[in-house]
Each structure stands twice: as structure tokens, then as C-alpha cells.
């Protein structure tokens, strides 16, 4: 087949796809739509330290004379059971990928390579991959440019290891923080999520039609509305009207599609009674026909087989998913029976061909049919970049003059269950780390403290449980110190004892796991002993700064004079926290979601529908800390906003004595609308760093305008509610 068009790298991609498709049997086509196997089952270590392929891989490639895609070849964690003794690292990951690819191509009659699909939730989920802060921390940076650089680094690591496709959470919007996957969201706001999703796509994929050797197609997950499941329970039903879906849960996906995202993943939840993997109105009517998306749609793990609850069996479940718009399954049986579905008339072969063409097109865009060179060294600078993101995300919520540490402080007590650990800084979907990787808050404070500052430590208690036996030692250290730094929080760290569902979600949280996929909470309280420790330390009278390391907001009383929040900041997050405590860097983060006063208030988010009612009789309806809130060690003054056309200008001045970063936030309030409006909607933002006394004019484009609106410029949603607005009327053709 030397004259085959699909073998010609100079031929147009569509011509190559058409030619290859015309040569394939129905069985081979079906094989391209299946991603049945766990990648870690495809290999095993040999006594000499190399790898050999397993009979399981041979059987899977024999089944369809090839392999459409392989999930998780590089994945390592408690669920896969892969660790540093059994899995591939940075030095041999590419060699393993090449070994598997050679086998797949040789087994394929037409020499079709496979796609290596990997989890890249906050950095590549592989041994020795750079771990970045979780998405909620990304949201707290309010810095798309920084995230674009981080995403580019993650893509380069993936490709250097022989991987191709990155699975990245980006589309879920926090509506109930009891949901264990809150940490995977950018926050509660659609505009903030949309800007960060654009940055993700640009950083990972680049801007060309094909992918450079250090760029990777991204699968945006989850489409759509998964953050709105009832009760904050994973994969539960969602009660979403079409307008709510469009206003809150689809803008990030729309932005990602416009930026050129290669693929999206259909979510587990249902929309209007139909699970997303079988929802033709969503995947075809909206995504493909209305938005013009021509990329790949992947189902979430085992989601296709769940459709058998509707269709009656897995053959028809696979047919429903494909007819609805799914191109590639994940671990399902249903798609393995698509040949039968075609023969039974449940699926048209032309529709199956369209799905296969999308899979093949992605492989051609990646250059997989040409000689591959996957021996490039992983990019340098991952640790520094992870630290930079962590610094930008640390958020100061309250400060009664305690921070930063002053010269009068000669001894500090570093207390709490999060003070001396890095394991609980990492978040879910994290590969095992080698001992010594990263920096805890205690380690960093000891290393960065100025000469003469005595740093003492006592853990006080564990993250979970009610064991109070360690509290007296913590009290003694606090009482003998000038300042207590109390590091509390939660953990998404999985252990070998964790029980897992078939799709990898935690079924039973053991040890200190209080967050992550499958770990949903009925409440938002910390472990009981943590509250006892907080009360005891504050009661000593020693000024106390509380640091929360967490994957969702927890309810913490305002009893300490300072409160610092660090959403799982990654291995080196302890250093970022210590730098802010010591005043070596500024607290630059801003809240990407509202922090409730109690679970009884939920749902709590700033962009709720406007109401004439005040709230509850027995408790305030307002959050404890509002969306966009974050303090600095300096002060800023904002001039009067000047809207002109579809931009607004505002002068920002640093009126304090230190350098600092303010995030200018522009909210709109719709005055005349055809439907009931939201109280406020974020429509633009920009971070600005200023030296003491410096003033700068910030110009922000206004998006999402229609009709008569009021523009309010503020430093948080709560401040925007009381700010004086500037009215303007947008052109009639400006989209909602």
C-alpha cells in the first residue's frame, strides 16, 4: 500500500482520513471507537528493570486487530496500584509508550497507531510528573496568563513521556461545595471559568491546526452541568432548566470550543432526564449543530453501559450513545458491540464512520502515522512553576494586624495536622511522590525564617476523628510563643486501603480522606478535634493565624485574628504559604467561590437570581466571605469607572507602603431584561500589580452585554452590591 493516500504526509488530512476509512472493515472501525483497557494492565516490570507487554494487551489488540485508544498507560495511584517500583517514570515512560505503540501498529492490518490518553488534572498524573495546585487554586489566582504557562508545561511533560491526549477538568461549576470534586472546579462563576478554560486550551494545544511535539489535544470535562447535582452528591441527578444550563454551566465549554478544544467528555449526570452520554440534544443538537464543534466526544468511565438502564441491554446502550454523539468510549462493554448494533439496524454505518473519522483525524493531527520521536527530556522548571501558581493562589481572608510577621515576633508555634505534611497538600488524582518531594509549612518556615526567629511545632490532632490527646502539647507551645500559626484543613490523599468503584472513584473514605471524587459531605465541618484545637489555641491569648489547606470551603469560626486560605497548593505549597506569612510575598489570591456561614444556607453563590426578600429569619443569607474577596498587605484606591462603548476604564492606585496586586472585577447588573435577572454577573477582570504610590489605568473589555445594564467595578461581589453603577445600553445585536 505504498501508494495509499493515508500514508502520504503531504496529503490533506481529510483526504487521508477518507482514504483510510475506505479501507477498513467494520470490525476495525469499531475497534477505533473503543478504549476498553486500563493502561496499567498492558505492561509489567521485568527483573532487569525493563518492561514487557502482557497477555491482556495482546488479547485486546487481537479483538479488533488494533487499538483505538489506551487510557492511563502512565497513571500511578492507589487505584491502579502503580508505584515507583512497578510503573514508568520520567526516564522510561517514553520507552514504554514506544513499546506498546510498536505492538499496536504491528497488530493492525493497516498500521493504525493508538492514542495514549492520560489524566492531567493538575499536572501529568504520572510518576515524577510535576504536580500543580488544584483547579480551585487556579481559580483563586484570577490569572489566565499564568495558567496558560502551567498548562503548556503539563502538555510538554505528557508528550515527552509518549502520551498524546490530556483529560482535564475545566467545565464543572461549583454550586454545592459539599461535592467532593469541588477541588476540580475553577469556581462558581461562568466567566472566570471560561477565561481559564481558554487559557487551558491555548496552553496545552497551541494555536495551530496540528499539534507541535510539545503540545497535546485536550479533552475538556465534564459536559455539562455536573457541578449542579442535587445535594452535592457525585453523579446524582441535576435539576437544570435550559436557561440555567446556558447561563451558568455552558459558557466555559463554549469558550473552550471557540478556542479550538480538540475534545470534550460527556458528564455522568442527566440533563432533563437523559444522561449526558445519551443526550442527543446536548451532544449533537447543541454542541455539533449549533456550536459547530467538529472534535471528539468521549464518554466518561462506564457511562455508556449505564444507559442500559434506559435501553434494556448494553448493545442498545452503545447504540444510543453513538447515535447521540459519543465517539469514544471509556472502559465500556457497550461500544464493543457496535458491529452487532450496525447489523441489527440500531446504528447506521455512515454514523459510525463519522465517529471513526473524528478519531482518525485526531491521530493524523498528532502526526502519529509519521515516525515518532518521544525521547525528548521532560521540560525543566516544573517546580518553580508550581510554586509560582501556589503563591498566586494564597488568599488572605481576614487580618487584624497579625500578618505579616512583625519584628516583635521572636517565637512562633506552628501547630495543626496540616503543618508538617505535604501529602495532604496535593489533591485528588495525584501520583505517588518520592520521599522528600515538596515542602510543608513547618519546613518552609524553618528554612525561610529570619535569624533569631524560633520556630516550635506540635501537631495537636489529626485531620479526622476526635482524639484530643495531642492538644495539651500544642497549648503549651502556643502559650510560650508570640504567634501561633494553626494549619488546619482536609485531604484528598488516597491510600492503598481506600476502596474504589469500578470507575476509580473512592467508595469508602478511610484514613484522613475528606475530599475528592466520591467523597461527598453532608456538612462542611472539619474533623471534630480540629475545632477543639482551634478553641484551645485561641484561648491561650496568643495571636493566632489560621491557615486552611483544603479542597472545598469549610466552616471555621471567626475567632482567630487572621485567616489564610490555600486550596490544595501542591507539593511546594508549604513554601508559598510560609512566604506570605513572613511577608516575603504578597497574598495575591481572591476567592473563586463564596464561603458559606453554614450548610443550612446552601446553595450560596453571588450570581443568584434577583429577589425582593431579605433571606432567613434565623441567620443571614449572605456568605461569610464573598466571591472575589481577598485582602492584601497594602491598600488600593479605585477611581470612578469610565465605560465607553464596550470597554470600561478605571484608575487603580496603590495607597499603601508595600507592593501589591489588586484584581479589578467588573460586574454587570441587568436593568431591563426579557427574563428574571441575576443580582450580579462578572463580565471582566484583570489583575494589576503596583508599587507603593503607583497609579495605573486599567482598560477592560465588556462581555455578555445586552439591553440596558449597570456596570459596577469593585474588588469583590459583596463590594459590587454596594457600589455605584454606571448605566449603559448595549447594541441590540450584542449576545447575551
Image (cartoon, helix red, strand yellow):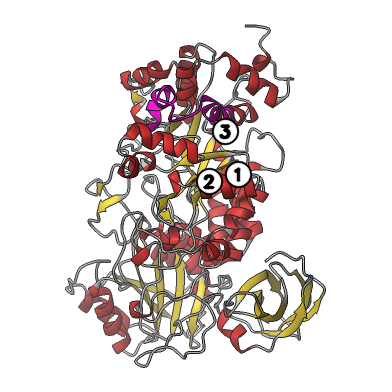
Q: How many marks?
A: 3
Residue 560 sits inside the magenta stretch: no
Q: Which residue is mark 3?
A: 377
If you read the primary sequence from the N terminus, does the residue marked by circle 1 or circle 2 appear first?
2
Q: Quadrant of the C terminus?
A: bottom right
Q: Secondary structure at mark 1?
A: helix
Q: CA distance from mark 2 to mark 3?
A: 38 Å
Q: Which residues are magenta?
A: 332-357
Q: Nearer the viewer, residue 411 or 91?
A: 91
If you read the primary sequence from the N terminus, does the residue marked by circle 2 or circle 3 appear first?
2
Report if the CB atoms under discs 1 and 2 are less than 8 Å apart. Answer: yes
Question: Label 3: how many residues lie within 10 Å, few (<14), some (14-19) or many (20+)?
Answer: some
Q: Nearer the viewer, residue 40 or 537?
A: 40
Q: Secondary structure at mark 3?
A: loop
Q: Quadrant of the N terminus?
A: top right
Return the mark for residue 219: none
Rendered position, 619 above or below 8: below
Amino acid at each position: 500500500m505504498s501508494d495509499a493516500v493515508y500514508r502520504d504526509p503531504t496529503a490533506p488530512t481529510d483526504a487521508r482520513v477518507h482514504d483510510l476509512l475506505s479501507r477498513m472493515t467494520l470490525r476495525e472501525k469499531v475497534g477505533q471507537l473503543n478504549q476498553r483497557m486500563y493502561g496499567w494492565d498492558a505492561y509489567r516490570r521485568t527483573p532487569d528493570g525493563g518492561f514487557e507487554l502482557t497477555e491482556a494487551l495482546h488479547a485486546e489488540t487481537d479483538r479488533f486487530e488494533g487499538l483505538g485508544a489506551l487510557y492511563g498507560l502512565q497513571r500511578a495511584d492507589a487505584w491502579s496500584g502503580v508505584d515507583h517500583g512497578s510503573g514508568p517514570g520520567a526516564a522510561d515512560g517514553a520507552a514504554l509508550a514506544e513499546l506498546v505503540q510498536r505492538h499496536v501498529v504491528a497488530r493492525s492490518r493497516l498500521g493504525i497507531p493508538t492514542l495514549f490518553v492520560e489524566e492531567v488534572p493538575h499536572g501529568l498524573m504520572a510518576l515524577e510528573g510535576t504536580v500543580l495546585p488544584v483547579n480551585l487554586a487556579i481559580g483563586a489566582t484570577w490569572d489566565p496568563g499564568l495558567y496558560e504557562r502551567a498548562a503548556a508545561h503539563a502538555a510538554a511533560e505528557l508528550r515527552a513521556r509518549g502520551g498524546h491526549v490530556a483529560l482535564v477538568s475545566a467545565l464543572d461549576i461549583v454550586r454545592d461545595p459539599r461535592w467532593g470534586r469541588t477541588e476540580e472546579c475553577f469556581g462558581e462563576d461562568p466567566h472566570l471559568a471560561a477565561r481559564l478554560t481558554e487559557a487551558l486550551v491555548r496552553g496545552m494545544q497551541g494555536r495551530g491546526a496540528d499539534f507541535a511535539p510539545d503540545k497535546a489535544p485536550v479533552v475538556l470535562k465534564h459536559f455539562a452541568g455536573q457541578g449542579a447535582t442535587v445535594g452535592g452528591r457525585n453523579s446524582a441527578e441535576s435539576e437544570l432548566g435550559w436557561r440555567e444550563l446556558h447561563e451558568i454551566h455552558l459558557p466555559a465549554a463554549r469558550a473552550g470550543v471557540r478556542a479550538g478544544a480538540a475534545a470534550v467528555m460527556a458528564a455522568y449526570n442527566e440533563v432533563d432526564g437523559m444522561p449526558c452520554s445519551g443526550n442527543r440534544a446536548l451532544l449533537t443538537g447543541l454542541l455539533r449543530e449549533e456550536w459547530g464543534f467538529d472534535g471528539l466526544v468521549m464518554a466518561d468511565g462506564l457511562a455508556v453501559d449505564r444507559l442500559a438502564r434506559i435501553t434494556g441491554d448494553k448493545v442498545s446502550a452503545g447504540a444510543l450513545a453513538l447515535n447521540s454523539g459519543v465517539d469514544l468510549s471509556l472502559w465500556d462493554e457497550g461500544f464493543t458491540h457496535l458491529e452487532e448494533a450496525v447489523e441489527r439496524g440500531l446504528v447506521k454505518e455512515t454514523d459510525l464512520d463519522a465517529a471513526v473519522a473524528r478519531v482518525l483525524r485526531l491521530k493524523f493531527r498528532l502526526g502519529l502515522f509519521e515516525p515518532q520521536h518521544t525521547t525528548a527530556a521532560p521540560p525543566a522548571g516544573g517546580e518553580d512553576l508550581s510554586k509560582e501558581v501556589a503563591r498566586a493562589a494564597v488568599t488572605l481572608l481576614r487580618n487584624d494586624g497579625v500578618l505579616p510577621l512583625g519584628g516583635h515576633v521572636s517565637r512562633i508555634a506552628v501547630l495543626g495536622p496540616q503543618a508538617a505534611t505535604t501529602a495532604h497538600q496535593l489533591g485528588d488524582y495525584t501520583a505517588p511522590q518520592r520521599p522528600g518531594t515538596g515542602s510543608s509549612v513547618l519546613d518552609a518556615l524553618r528554612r525561610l525564617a529570619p535569624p533569631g526567629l524560633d520556630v516550635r511545632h506540635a501537631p495537636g490532632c489529626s485531620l479526622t476523628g476526635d482524639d484530643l490527646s495531642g492538644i495539651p502539647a500544642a497549648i503549651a507551645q502556643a502559650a510560650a510563643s508570640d504567634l501561633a500559626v494553626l494549619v488546619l484543613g482536609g485531604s484528598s490523599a488516597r491510600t492503598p486501603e481506600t476502596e474504589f468503584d469500578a470507575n476509580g472513584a473512592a467508595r469508602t473514605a478511610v484514613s484522613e480522606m475528606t475530599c475528592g471524587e466520591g467523597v461527598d459531605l453532608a456538612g462542611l465541618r472539619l474533623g471534630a478535634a480540629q475545632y477543639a484545637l482551634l478553641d484551645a489555641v485561641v484561648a491561650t491569648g496568643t495571636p493566632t493565624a489560621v491557615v486552611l489547606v483544603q479542597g472545598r470551603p469549610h466552616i471555621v469560626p471567626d475567632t482567630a485574628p487572621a485567616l489564610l486560605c490555600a486550596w490544595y497548593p501542591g507539593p511546594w505549597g508549604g513554601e508559598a504559604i510560609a512566604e506570605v506569612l513572613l511577608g516575603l510575598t504578597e497574598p495575591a489570591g481572591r476567592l473563586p467561590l463564596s464561603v458559606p456561614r453554614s450548610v443550612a444556607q446552601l446553595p450560596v453563590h453571588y450570581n443568584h437570581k434577583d429577589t425582593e426578600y431579605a433571606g432567613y429569619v434565623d441567620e443571614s443569607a449572605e456568605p461569610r466571605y464573598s466571591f472575589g474577596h481577598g485582602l492584601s498587605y497594602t491598600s488600593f484606591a479605585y477611581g470612578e469607572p469610565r465605560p465607553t462603548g464596550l470597554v470600561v476604564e478605571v484608575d487603580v492606585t496603590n495607597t499603601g507602603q508595600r507592593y501589591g496586586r489588586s484584581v479589578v472585577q467588573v460586574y454587570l447588573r441587568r436593568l431591563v431584561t426579557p427574563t428574571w435577572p441575576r443580582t450580579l454577573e462578572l463580565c471582566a477582570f484583570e489583575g494589576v500589580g503596583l508599587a507603593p504610590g503607583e497609579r495605573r489605568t486599567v482598560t477592560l473589555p465588556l462581555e455578555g452585554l445586552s439591553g440596558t445594564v449597570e456596570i459596577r467595578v469593585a474588588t469583590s461581589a459583596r463590594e459590587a452590591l454596594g457600589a455605584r453603577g454606571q448605566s449603559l445600553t448595549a447594541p441590540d445585536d450584542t449576545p447575551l
